[in-house]
Amino acid sequence: MDAVLPPIMISSGLMPTGSLMKSLIHISSEVASVEKHPFLQFRNISTMIRRIKFLSFLFEDIRETNSPLPPSSLLCLTELFSVIQRVKLLIQRCKGGSSLWALIQTEFLSNQFHALVKEMGGALDILPLNLLNLSTDTREQVELLHKQAKRVDLLVDPQELLRREELLQIMASNNQKNSRNKGFVDFVKVKEVFSCIGLRSPLDYEEEISKLEAEAEKQAGTGGLIVVSNINNLISLLTYSKSVIFIDRHREEIKENFKQLSASLNRNQDVSSSSQSILSNIPDEFRCPISLDLMKDPVIVASGHTYDRNSIAQWINSGHHTCPKSGKRLIHRALIPNYALKGLVHQWCQDNNVPLIENSTSSYSKFERSSSKSKLSEKATGHFSPTKAAMDAVKMTAEFLVGKLAMGSPEIQRQAAYELRLLAKTGMDNRRIIAEAGAIPFLVTLLSSTDPRIQENAVTALLNLSIFDNNKILIMAAGSIDSIINVLESGKTTEARENAAATIFSLSIISDCKVTIGTRPRAFSALVGLLREGTATGKKDAVSALFNLSVYNANKASVVFAGAVPLLIELLMDDKAGITDDALTLLVLLSGCSEGLEEIRQSRILIPMVIDILRFGSTKGKESSITLLLGLCKDGGEEFARCLLINPRSIPSLQSLSSDGSLKARRKADALLRLLNRCCSQSHNPVV
């Protein structure tokens, strides 16, 4: 819980009257001009502002009299200055802080307002109104304010107390649902409570999550573990609620679609009243190829075939590494939920009164089994685990959103992809859980969407997911690379193209991915195109991706053939692009293949640019420049060396670098000076 607002420190000597009155009028004006009061503490804030407006009349009158004030008046005014400063801070906290946390603290905040009013009344006790030359109206207002402040009662809004109790009940239900898969969260009530405190749009929810995270970070330093746990509980509730409330607008429509699809599949089947007869009429599409039983939790394996989770898990755990149906070797063992089929199976079971027992093989339950020690520790301390709450929230949200990707309308898919994009933006655990929920294949499919926002959100979500190394393999295995290249070539938005380049950069960190991408010449052409036409961010992403791909020797020639070299040389002095060091580093890498070396040597504008970088560039730029020049002058580069000697600034720049550069740069500058000495020793004086 927050500490009570500390009194503002005032110097031991009273402020000069003029400065004090000026400060009082200024701070009173700041508080009185507050607009758009927060939804919480509205009555306390508005009443406090009205009181301070009355005080501002007092301060104005005192300033206009311009007469000496008795010592007790100065003491009173100094105390009022301190009180008003703390009022200002308290109002700012209510306006700028978390609304949910303020609702939890509603009695505490009300007590702070009450205490400040009492302090205001105490300060007015020593104000000698009879000795001040005040107008009648002002005197009466101050006297009335003094009486009210002395007998004011604590004001706690009963509506806020009611909303707080409703919120606490919702939090309890959410905890129960998270920890034991029981309980029910009434999202109609959640939406109502959140709306009453100003949370009415997805942006409101995102801002509130950020404020709660900041509050948790602030509280973590105070040792309040239970407080931090409660805040994390609020974050998990808000995250999950945001997805449900703003995406699940077409639940009935989707359910109706299920019914229609199920009816289409079952219209030619005779269903008897007995459960045995019903089970014998299970559609073939709903039967597991291994057990031939109804698939209650269908999952997709790397080959693209669908099985019941229990059956295929037993198959894999027994040592098999192939698909039972196709016989193909599984390149990975991830089991991706088939939400579309699962929805149809569930609907069929409901229509035919077939009991359906969920398999408890979620990614989080696996985490729980592998973390028994930490779980025991949690039980021992009796505290709610913030980590567990966060992971539960991510798991529920990810599964919910993937279901929307699989079966939602374009509008729902757009919003679901955006939510996954945000969810995958931070935290390796988030990225792992989202992938385990089966998001990657659906996101890859959405890359070909004609909706610009769906495509942009899908490629950005994949970019964020690819930061987790295991997801790189899953993204590649989902057949994503051609679709990503298509977005890179002709994405609907600039951001989609740039994020496609960043995704290729991220994927190409893995050696196998470098090889796979290297078999697509279109990838290099598209990256060079972005290097030419993109924004500063896009050019940065493109050059980074080209560098990663060029680390694999076989790809260097492809980068050269795509036209990268002349463009990289032009970009060396493009201050707006801001990729001088990156372009130089890539040129050094490309000079390692014969095609790149030859094309770089043919450039007539390279030497002046590189000499300027030697003189004025960054440490990294100078090191790359000298490395490039040394490589170009060696092994048959005599002609390039002579061109370098002709430039009047080359030798002084090299000599300066040889004496003042980094250790690496000095060593290479000395080597290049010796090489140039040998080159000109026959026809010119040696280089000094």
Image (cartoon, grey):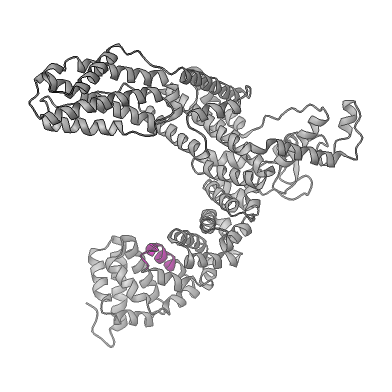
Residue range in magenta is 574-588
Question: Which quadrant holds residue 8?
Answer: top left
The answer to whether 506 appears left or right of 132 in the picture is: right
Which secondary structure is most common in the magenta stretch?
helix
Report if residue 660 lies within the magenta region. Answer: no
Question: Which quadrant holds residue 242?
Answer: top right
Rendered-image quadrant of the C terminus? bottom left
Does residue 8 show up? no
- Name above or below for residue 680 compared with residue 564: below
Q: Position of residue 509 (x, y in %)?
A: 51, 54
Does residue 553 show up? yes
State the residue in front, 79 or 190: 79
Q: Position of residue 348 (x, y in %)?
A: 80, 34
Residue furthest to the top in view is 151
- Name above or below for residue 561 compared with residue 240: below
The answer to whether 367 appears left or right of 594 in the picture is: right
Question: Which quadrant holds residue 79?
Answer: top left
Report if residue 575 lies within the magenta region. Answer: yes
> Residue drawn 26% across and 76% down?
649
